[in-house]
Image (tube, rainbow, N blue to C red):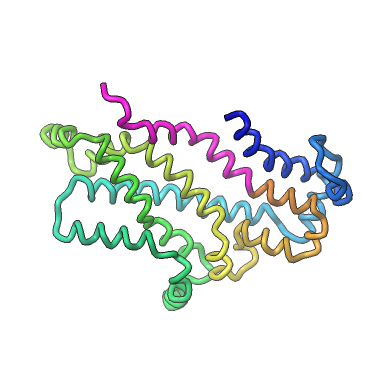
Amino acid sequence: MAVLAIVCLVPFLMMLVNATRSNDDILTGFTLVPGASLIENYKTMMDYVNVWTGFKNSLFISVTVTILSGYFSALTAYGFAFYTFKGKNFLFVIMLVMMMVPGQLGLIGFYELSKTLGILDTYIPLIVPAVASPFVVFFLRQYILTTLHPSLIEAARIDGASEFKIFHIVALPIMMPAVATMSIFTFIGSWNNYIMPLVLIFSPEKYTLPVLMGFLKGSQVAQNLGSMYLGIAISVVPIMVAFFFLSKYIINSISAGAIKE
């Protein structure tokens, strides 16, 4: 495990160290000693791309998608798990089929739809469709079926609780480990989303960080490897922070149901 941890951490360490070194130093080879060109690399990068604008835009989109996807996916999964209604199995099968269809296949049609609705060059097509995640709903449904006993819901109904109150007071707290687990992957997927913002956003001040990083590679900054490493390091920091604070929920989610009391 120690060897695997080192293998996983070395690329991140290389990225952070190279962000402080000059282009000539990077070309000479790798070292664990940080350089003295951090400020110079930062100024070179900012001369071509305002990374912090893209950082703010990506953070807003990713946080919004993560919160909305977690809540509405949990609500949908709860409905699939504990309610009986007409067409339930058919809708669930359709949802499973949608998990197997790559989103890129519908890119042209989605662009035309966004154009017709007049929502191009806005964050609406980047946020609203991402809220409906079939995989998150499927994962949460399977999780709640193994952790929430129907008798708890029946007891809450006997006590006079409304259906929404039962969901918020009984079901949602039990689902939180799974919601947190899926929130990590949702946040990472939204943060790293490149093709959709590239196609749907036209205004430079609305570009997300991955799009700006793509432009950075095609500019003169690409000749300065230190600036490139610094830009990549800035783009990776939120993912590392999110994983650091939410990683404990992954263990709880995986181990749920493994021990019976």
Main secondary-structure element of the magenta-colored stretch? helix
Which residue is rendered at x = 17% and y = 48% of the image?
83
Position in image of residue 106 (x %, y %): 43, 71
Q: Which residues are magenta?
A: 236-261
- Name the residue nearer the viewer: 261 or 203: 261
- Name the residue nearer the viewer: 123 or 88: 88
Position in image of residue 87 (x %, y %): 17, 61
Position in image of residue 145 (x %, y %): 25, 40
Which residue is rendered at x = 53% and y = 69% of the image?
200
Which residue is rendered at x = 14% and y = 55% of the image?
85
Q: Is residue 254 magenta?
A: yes
Specify the quadrant that holds the N terminus: top right
Q: Is residue 7 left or right of residue 168?
A: right
Q: Is residue 192 magenta?
A: no
- Judged from this view, the residue extending furthest toward the top is 261
Position in image of residue 201 (x %, y %): 56, 68
Specify the quadrant that holds the C terminus: top left
Rendered position, 85 above or below 157 = below
Q: Is residue 166 left or right of residue 66?
A: left
Rendered position, 130 above or below 253 = below
Rendered position, 111 above or below 219 = below
Q: Is residue 254 left or right of residue 78?
A: right
Count of numbered labels shown in the rendering: 0
Which residue is rendered at x = 62% and y = 52% of the image?
55
